[in-house]
Image (cartoon, grey):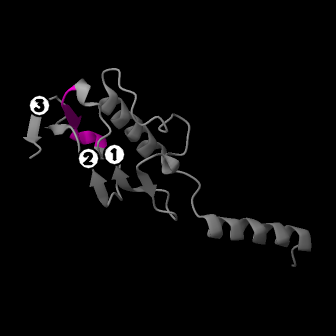
Amino acid sequence: MECPQVFCFWVLVVVSLLWLYGCFGCYEKERSALLELKFSINNPNGTFLPSWKAGADCCSWEGVRCDSNTGRVVELNIRWTRDEGLGYWYMNASLLLPFKNLRSLDLTGSLEGLIDEEGMHLSPID
């Protein structure tokens, strides 16, 4: 049974576009984790990372690089993104758990240390 030419044409176009452009955005879990990370960096009352907005494709955000095939975050470069006037930043280490394919992480700046989910200090950053 042959498929109609028009149908076959459109299937070919869609498959070609998917192959050419790959994934069209980041994973929801990763986007949510990035927004939590932004809140942590900006807390209280900071204004850094303005391109990080709910509902937007996190692969296009400042400092975020995604794999073009999977849409997974592979690099996160948010160095010097915290206003020194806000004091030191202790990041909850669990915020990084959703990033299954993360290969590069740069948090250089005012990151003082890591904390676990209960708020206990894990380790200072030297």
Picture layout, residue 32 above or below residue 26: above
Q: Left of 59 or right of it: where is 19? A: right
Residue identifier under label 2: 107
Q: Secondary structure at mark 3?
A: loop
Residue identifier under label 3: 120
Q: Position of residue 95 (x, y in %)?
A: 29, 40
Q: Left of 64 or right of it: where is 126? A: left
- Inspect the magenta stretch and tell me whether residue 91 lies in it: yes
Q: Left of 29 or right of it: where is 69? A: right
- Inspect the magenta stretch and tell me whether residue 71 lies in it: no
Which one is in front, 1 or 16? Answer: 16
Report the span colored magenta: 87-95
Question: Label 2 vs label 1: CA separation?
Answer: 5 Å
Residue type (three-letter) at the residue carrying disc 2: Leu
Find residue 78 and name its label: 1
Q: Secondary structure at mark 1?
A: loop
List the single residue furthest toward the top: 45
Which label lies toward us, 2 or 3? Answer: 2
At label 1, counting other C-alpha atoms closer than 10 Å, the crowd grade (few under 14, some 14-19, many 20 or more) is some
Q: Quadrant of residue 57?
A: top right
Residue type (three-letter) at the residue carrying disc 1: Ile
Residue type (three-letter) at the residue carrying disc 3: Met
Tell which circle, 2 or 1, labels the residue nearer the N-terminal end: 1
Tell which circle, 3 or 1, labels the residue nearer the N-terminal end: 1
